[in-house]
Image (spheres, grey):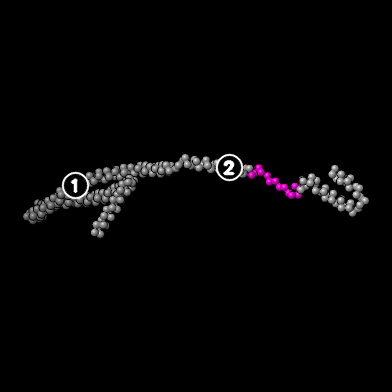
Amino acid sequence: MNLLVRIFKFLQSEAHSFVSRFEDPVKLIEQGIRDLKKDFDESMKNVAQIKAIAIGTKKELEAKKQIADDYEHKAMILLQKAKNNELEESEADRLAAEALKKRKEALAQVEKLSQDAKKYDESLEQMSKKVMQLKDKIKEAENEYTSLKARATVAKTTKKVNQQLSSVNLDSTSAMIEEMKTKIQAEENLAEAYEQTLPIETSVDDEINKAIGTDIDIQKSLEAMKQKLLANPEDNNDIDKLKKDLED
């Protein structure tokens, strides 16, 4: 049961991962390019290995050709020695036959190596074409990736801007601005009214003096004069005259 649960969770996570990658083509192409480059590297390694084998085969082919030529040359030398009585004819024939046998074996190997070398060259030609096709696909995918990435960036930015603009209530914003203008204007008018209103200070003494109708300094002088006259009765006759003078 636990195993089934784990398998289900694994498949579920893989499904989510697949959907996520499928929904983002940029990431999908990035992964595809990485896979193509990995295949390209593997192909280049295989081409290099086959090329190395082909080079080794051709070197061995040339060596076998040389061996065949050497045995043919040795057989001719043995026969020449027998002709010159430098070697028994029977012995020369035996050794020459052995040399020709070795030459035949070498020629058989030359034939086989020639066929192998031809196959390797054909394989290299085919693989080189496939590698070049793979390289072209990688270049094409990279160009497509660059274009698609730029389009995805523009699309994502445009989507974000449109979402932001669609969430803005222009009517309510304009209403708030107008309301704020009205409040500010009212505050400015009130400030101007306060500035134009000057404080008026009125003292009690001013009110009293106004009610009396006589300047307070004159009143004080009058009172002082009355006190002086009371102290000197002979001057009472001049009170009315003095009062009149002060009022004038």
Question: Toward the viewer: 214 or 184?
Answer: 214
Question: Toward the viewer: 150 or 137?
Answer: 150
Badge 2: residue crowd in 10 Å (few <14, some 14–19, many ≥20): few
Q: Position of residue 140 (x, y in %)?
A: 31, 42
At numbered mark 2, what does the secondary structure look like: helix, strand or loop?
A: helix
- Rendering quarter of residue 7: bottom left
Q: Position of residue 78 (x, y in %)?
A: 11, 53
For image coordinates 56% across by 43% down, the residue present is 184
What's under tag 2, amino acid-wise?
Ala
Q: Position of residue 67 (x, y in %)?
A: 16, 52
Residue at the extreme left of the image, as rendered: 90
Badge 1: residue crowd in 10 Å (few <14, some 14–19, many ≥20): few
Cα gap from disc 1 to disc 2, whole angstroms:
98 Å
- Rendering quarter of residue 231: bottom right
For image coordinates 75% across by 47% down, the residue present is 207
What residue range appears in magenta? Answer: 194-207
At numbered mark 1, what does the secondary structure look like: helix, strand or loop?
A: helix
Q: What residue did someone put label 2 on? A: 186
Question: Toward the viewer: 14 or 240?
Answer: 240
Q: Position of residue 160 (x, y in %)?
A: 40, 44
Residue at the extreme right of the image, as rendered: 234
What's under tag 1, amino acid-wise?
Lys
86 left or right, relative to 212? left
Of marks 1 and 2, the one in the foreground = 2
